[in-house]
Amino acid sequence: VPDMPDAGQRPGLLGRMLGRSDAPRRVLDDAMLESLEELLIQADMGVETAVRVTANIAEGRFGKRISTPELREALAAEVARIMTPVARPMPLYPTKPQVVLVVGVNGSGKTTTIGKLASQFKAAGKSVVIAAGDTFRAAAVEQLQIWGARAGVPVLTAPEGSDPASLAFDALTKARVDGADLLMIDTAGRLQNRQDLMEELAKIVRVIRKVDPTAPHNTLLVLDATTGQNALLQVEIFRKIADVSGLVMTKLDGTAKGGVLVALADKFGLPIHAIGVGEQIDDLAPFDPEDFARALVG
Ligand code: GDP
C-alpha cells in the first residue's frame, strides 16, 4: 500500500491510496494490514475504528494473496456493514406539531440544514414553522429568515438578546393553534460557553414540555463532516447537554473527510438522517450506506 500523506481529503481518495487495480496480488500479511490501518486512520476513521475494520478484513483472508480490487471490495463491504444500521431518515410522528430541536456548533450548517429540511417537508405536503432560537446572533436570525423565505415557511423571531425558551414556547403555542405539522427550533451554537449553552438548551426543553410533555420529538445534531475527528468530540459534548436523537452530516460535497462518518457510526450508532451535499436548498440527501462506501473506497 503506497504511503500518501493527504489521505482522506475527499471521498474516493482512500481507493486511490490503495493503489493500482492492476497491481499484482499480494499476500495479506501483518505489514500490509498495518499500512491499511494507517490509511484508514489518515482517512479520518479514528484509531479504534481503523483497528476494528482492519481486523475484520484480515479475518479469513490473512496469509492469502489478495488483489487491490478484492481489498477495495472487502473494505467497501465492511464500511457498508457498519453504516447500514445508522442510515435512517428522521422519524415522523403523528403529533401536531412534531417538534424538532436543531443543535450544533456555529458554522456547522444548522441554518442551511433547517432551510433544506423545511423545504423537503413542505414539498412532502407538511406545514412547517421555524423558530429562530439563536436570539443572540442577529446575523443567524437574518440568515434563517432568508432560508425560510426560500423554503416558503414562516420564521418566528424574537428581539435580539431575548430568551430563546420564551420564543420556543410562543412558537410551539402558535404552531399548535395553526395546526402545523412540524416546528423546527434553531438553537445557539456557542460551545465556548458550554455551561450557558447547556442551561439554555435545558430551559428550552423544559418550557416546551409545558405545552407538550412529549417534545422535543427529535433532537438533531448538525455536524460539519470536514472537521474530521472534531466531529466525534462534538457528539460527545452535545450528548451531554442535549438528548441527541440523530445526526445530519453537512459538507459531504467537495473536500469532505468522509471517513469520520464511519468512526461516528462505529462509536455512537446514532442514526444519520441526512447528508448535506452543497449550499443550495435541494442539496440535502438521504444517507445511502452503499453509495457512501463506494465513494469512500473509490
Ligand atoms: P450555522 O452557523 O451552523 O447555522 O451554519 P450555516 O448554515 O450558516 O452554514 C455555514 C456555512 O456552511 C455556509 O456558508 C453554508 O453555505 C455552508 N454549508 C452548509 N451546509 C453545507 C453543505 O452541505 N455543503 C457545503 N458545501 N456547504 C454547506
Image: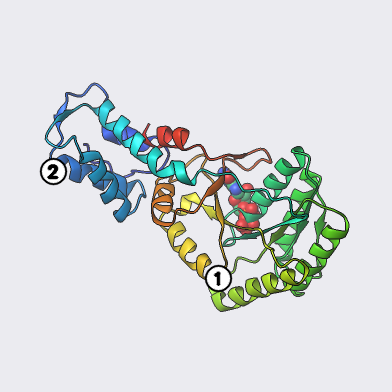
- In the picture provided, is 194 more to the left or to the right than 32? right
Q: Position of residue 256 (x, y in %)?
A: 47, 44
Q: What residue type is labelled 2?
A: Asp
List the residue tagged with mark 2. 30
- Pick whichever, 278 or 89, lies toward us: 89
Residue at point 55% right, 70% down?
241
- x then y, percent, for residue 83: 43, 43
Percent from the top left, x then y, of residue 172? 79, 63
Mark before the other along the chain sequence, 1 or 2: 2
Q: Whole-Å distance between the Cαs marked 1 and 2?
A: 42 Å
**Disc 1 marks which amino acid?**
Ile
Q: Quarter holding the C terminus?
A: top left
Q: Which residue is drawn at 73% across and 47% down?
A: 118
- Quadrant where the image shows the N terminus: top left
Question: Farthest residue toward the top?
Answer: 22
Neighbours of disc 2 within 10 Å: few (<14), some (14-19), many (20+)? few
Q: Residues within 10 Å of mark 1 (few under 14, many from 20)?
A: some
Q: Residue at x 62, y 77 (%)?
A: 199
Residue 274 higher or lower than 217, as above or below: above
Q: Mark 1 points at which residue?
A: 241
